[in-house]
Amino acid sequence: MALLAELPELVGFFSYSREDDEDSNGKLSALRGAIGSELAQHLGRSKRRDFQLWQDQAAIAAGDDWESEISKAIGQAAFFIPIVTPRAVASRHCKFEFESFLARESELGRDDLIFPILYVPVPALLDEAKWRNDPVLSIVGKRQHFDWRRFRHVAPETTVYGEAIESFCEQIVAKLREPWVSPEERRQLEAEAKKRAEDEERFRQETDARRQAEERVRLRKEAIAKKRAEEEARERQEAETKRRGEEEEQERVRKEALAKMHLAPLTAAEERALKPGDSFKEGPDCPEMIVVPAGRFLMGSPEGQGNADEHPQHEVTIARPFALAKFALTFDEWDACAARGGCRSDVSDNGWGRGRRPAINVTWDDAQAYVKWLSSVTGKPYRLLSEAEHEYAARAGSETKYPWGDDIKLDGQAMANCYGCGSQWDDKQTAPVGSFAANRFGLNDMVGNVSAWTEDCWNNSYKGAPTDGSPWTSDARSSRVVRGGSWIINPDSLRSANRNRASTVDRGSALGFRVARTLTP
């Protein structure tokens, strides 16, 4: 990689209308001189030895072929400064210079070496439909240009004139100092690419030859393969017969469980008739479920707010309604699973009591065991929430810190159980589920009391996170996201956007979960 600013002999091309220069008593030539001097200083160059800002009037001697000299100069130029005036726009000579440098710019492999100076208002530039279709005006209209109109009548020796020249030259120098692939380097790269292509073609031919040889081997083995296929088909048939038998046995066990547990899973018609806000239970020992509506929301915290892992804030679309337990899973519901062999029976309640208190001291794998058991006995797709679904359901349409507002209390009343929420259970123990008001979706305790396991793996930010509400499980790490905060955590950790994590083997008096259920379309 090289820099245009480091070329041994650096040439810039100054394009203008001679009539404009004459009518302005040489102001354009003077402007070129001021720009040339300023560029030479910025670049550490000598205008006599290794830097030239080329101008036809100064460089073409009488009798020389104008077009040949112009082409030669542009063929050496590294940047191009056209003075844009109505005459210049209409000039055949200026257009020739402009289009010649466009070809030179392409040869250099750049598209940022033209620095137009708008000197006099050009009516054609006011009509975008016209200038976009003009090869010269489109460059002036689209690229960075310098508006010199207000400096035309400023004396060159004034500070404002000098500062304008300096600002313009700084832009040119910055472009000349950007990394640049020279034509020689490009030719070398192209040669290397050609060689790679030839190597790839040779490899392809060798690969094709190898494949043909392998095909011949395959054909020779076809007879053996046919016999093996027949044996495998027989084995598959036996396996399918065994699988059907196992499925029939599972269905028999499920029906027995339905009878014993008095389960009444929703029929397809009942499920299709559900509306947002409706509730249902598919058995006396099953969680009460609330239908959460489809919708969109901004997940995470705005820039400058919240914790680093809550960014970037992004829109998530929940395309279809889903069902979510009204409460965190209770010990009553957990113990029903344990009594039937689906869950561990040794989960401690810390001596606080079971019943309607949230099930605690459960690992992520315990939560997975419960939803697997509930799905098996009901025949319905129960699962854990995704992290996005949890924040969506917790917010229930709100954009405030907490589902009810920006203060931890509402009108002086405790709205959750945490360390500093103002409830009777703060920093002591869990509260029975439903001890606090439900949010606008009809869900209780979405924040506080116990943190809830989610399906998602932990990531340190939302960069690359799904935007459709699905769980982010591409990472096989053992840490999972927990949401909602708990009785032992301060109010800031109960914010709807707050995130936390735990290892899948972690358990504690602040960890529980809440079940979700996918609804049939």
Image: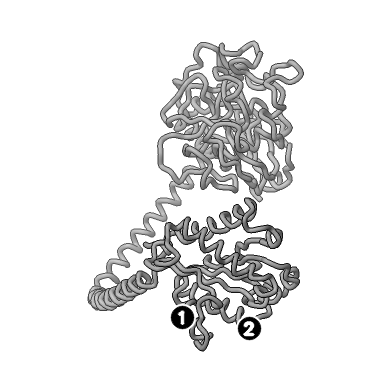
Q: Quadrant of residue 143?
A: bottom right
Q: Is residue 1 above or below residue 510?
A: below
Residue in front for this viewpoint, 244 or 270: 270
Q: Find disc 1 in the rendering and name its residue.
A: 72
Q: Is residue 5 above or below residue 85?
A: above
Classify mark 1: helix, strand or loop: helix
Q: Quadrant of residue 220?
A: bottom left
Q: Find disc 2 in the rendering and name its residue.
A: 92
Q: Residue at x 38, y 59 (%)?
A: 237
Left of 7 or right of it: where is 196?
left
For badge 1, the amino acid type reads Lys
Classify mark 2: helix, strand or loop: helix
Q: Position of residue 489 (x, y in %)?
A: 55, 20
Q: Residue at x 71, y 44 (%)?
A: 270
Q: Position of residue 259 (x, y in %)?
A: 58, 34
Q: Position of residue 107 (x, y in %)?
A: 45, 75
